[in-house]
Image: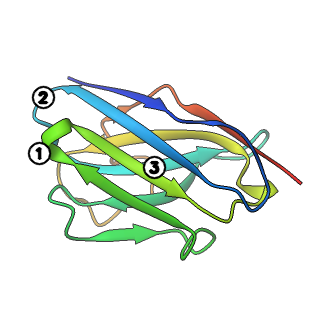
Amino acid sequence: QVQLVESGGGLVQAGGSLRLSCAASGRTFSDYSMGWFRQAPGKERAFVAHITWRGRRTYYADSVKGRFTISRDNANNTVYLQMNSLKPEDTAVYSCAAEKYDTIWYFRPDPYDYWGQGTQVTVSS
């Protein structure tokens, strides 16, 4: 089992920045590739970013490319999502997730084995 706890969400004005953290406990964190997803009210869960288990490769949704950066600190069992130039359409609950097999389907929720409870990000215009 892997337990994931997100933090860092909040209310920010458009153009501002937030950094989300996802702290992992349980099994060896460095064995898992990590993803961030978000879900806005009335919408399906959407892929945001993914980082492989050693952090050598990262992937982003087109909507956040150039504004968001995913990173990880395996020594401290934490994955981060730095969000800059935030827009009102970034408003959502953001969740981190862990998957063990470095899947090519990283942009889909299905391959992920463990999920955090989510943290709310609200961007005002």
Q: Position of residue 28 (x, y in %)?
A: 10, 35
The mark total stands at: 3
- Secondary structure, mark 1, is helix
Q: Position of residue 33 (x, y in %)?
A: 24, 52
Q: Quadrant of the N terminus?
A: top left
The disc labelled 3 sits on which kind of residue? Trp
* Residue pictured at 19% horizontal, 69% vertical: 56
Q: Position of residue 75 (x, y in %)?
A: 13, 42
Near-viewer residue (60 or 108):
60
Q: Position of residue 113 (x, y in %)?
A: 30, 36
The disc labelled 2 sits on which kind of residue? Arg
Any part of residue 82 in sight: yes
Question: Label 1: few (<14), some or many (≥20) within 10 Å?
Answer: some
Q: Quadrant of residue 55?
A: bottom left
Question: Label 2: few (<14), some or many (≥20) within 10 Å?
Answer: few
Near-viewer residue (102 or 75):
75
Q: Quadrant of residue 62?
A: bottom right
The disc labelled 1 sits on which kind of residue? Asp
Horizontal side of residue 3 vs 53, given as left or right: right
CA–CA distance between discs 1 and 2?
Answer: 8 Å
Question: Label 3: few (<14), some or many (≥20) within 10 Å?
Answer: many
Horizontal side of residue 92 vs 96, given as left or right: right
Any part of residue 106 in sight: no
CA–CA distance between discs 1 and 3?
Answer: 17 Å
Q: Are marks 1 and 2 in contact (CB under 8 Å)?
A: yes
- Secondary structure, mark 3, is strand
Residue on which disc 1 sits: 31
Disc number at residue 36? Answer: 3
Residue on which disc 2 sits: 27
